Image (spheres, rainbow, N blue to C red):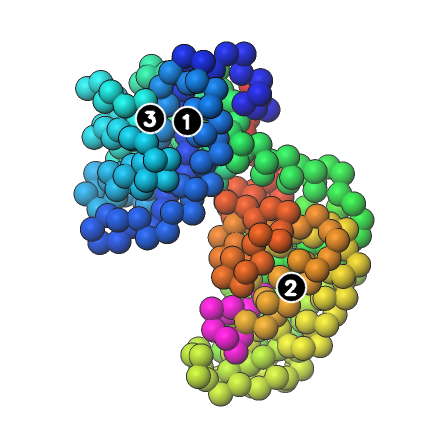
Amino acid sequence: MKALNDIPVIKGKRVLVRVDFNVPLNESGEVKNDKRIRIALPTIQYLLDQGVGRLILMTHVGRPKGPDPLLKTDKIARRLSDLLRRPVGKTDDWGERGLPEETIILLENLRFHPGEKSKDPVERDAFGKQLASLADLYVDDAFSNLHRDHASMTSVPKFLPGYAGLTVEKEVSNIQKVLERPEHPFVAVMGGLKADKLAAISFLLEKADHILIGGALAFSLLKIEGYSMGASKVDDEGMEEMGELVKKIQKNPRIHLPVDTVIADRFAEDAKTETVSIDQVKEGWMALDIGPKTIQNYVNFLTRAKTIIWFGPIGVFEMEPFSQGTKAIGKAMTESHALTIVGGGDSASAVESMGYGEKMTLVSTGGGASLKMIEGAAMPGLKALSA
């Protein structure tokens, strides 16, 4: 993977940067949370400090089916301008009608163009070639999209020299370290709902010493083992599709499942709750968190760990009565002396909301991308930078 310090000459060059400014916008298009913009600032500032001639930024926003006035990048450009304290130009297209005069420019939402996500590689490459015509160099700082074969990720570097931005370099290097040379004991924590995490769990069985499972994923596995899960949310369909992986995981001594759980009579913060053994979930009640015995078991593993990765909350952390498991995992990780990596998505939201984010080695900006790396799956965007 070629990084920024591998670029022979930046001064005076036109640099096209794929950023991830997929930020939440309100009904008037104003940025509600600018964290993703702030994450890209080190790469942007590095290029500016090196005397870049022109900095052209491109991003997607949301999942539009076509042009959508609520998902335009105008207000994002204004927010970036505020953060950089310098003008940021904005185009209403992708450079077809020329670029504004500012040194820093943000293009329109990439997903307004049919070529960005086209299934037709010829159409994708045509859009990629058009984008590449705007610059001399390409930098990819959108780690969260590395697993997607989109024009801005994989077609552009066919026509320009491509390099990894600081965000991509940091995330990839930390995750590769875990996959290639982890310090032991190596503990993985897997939560959330979807059975698709079983692919990552299967891959990790060859590397991790212990895999601690919580959330609806754990309750789905326990249901398959014959436990009654009452009205708990489970992924029956996903488990059926992952049948062979389920068999591989079941009864494996490296896999650890909850022995007790916090149950509720309904999905609400003020619901009636009880803590019960995993074999005592009541009919009509739902398991929404791991119980104190499971918390202690899991914390014991984490305390001794040298490497920890965490994908998916352990309970419904957004509701205080069911947040204790997720809090305990986060706290134990910050108090350990381990290399700690938190997958993006809900896991990242959990640690940030609980104030643990700054104490982790890495809180990933892309849950899907980091999970795909852990699975050992193909990463088209990453491959494009190493071609």
Left or right side of 257 for 193:
left
User: Which residue is at the front of the view, 13 or 158?
Assistant: 13
- In this view, the residue farthest toward the front is 85
Which mark is on residue 239? none
**Mark 3 or mark 1: whose residue is earlier in sequence:** 1
Examine the rendering and report whether any part of residue 198 can be seen: no
Per the rendered image, the range of residues in magenta is 314-322
| Tags 3 and 1 touching, CB below 8 Å | no
* Along the viewing direction, whichever of 224 and 24 lies nearer the viewer: 24
- The residue singled out by tag 2 in the image is 331
Which residue is denoted by mark 1 in the rendering? 17
Q: Earlier in the sequence, mark 2 or mark 1?
A: 1
Position of 229 relative to 106 (above/below): below
Q: Is residue 34 left or right of residue 173?
A: left
Would you place residue 132 above or below residue 177 in this image?
Answer: above
Q: Magenta stretch: residue 321 in it?
A: yes
The kind of residue on which mark 3 rests is: Ile
Marks 3 and 2 in Cβ contact (< 8 Å): no
In the picture of the structure, the residue carrying the numbered disc 3 is: 104
In the image, what residue occupies the spot 70% across and 60% down? 335
Q: Could you tell me residue 179's position as x and y percent?
A: 70, 40
Which residue occupies 73% across, 57% down?
Answer: 336
Q: Amino acid at mark 2?
A: Lys
The Cα atoms of the two marked residues, 3 and 2, are separated by 41 Å
Up the image or down, 109 lies above or below 189; here it is above
Disc 2 to disc 1, C-alpha distance? 36 Å
Q: Is residue 147 left or right of residue 184?
A: left
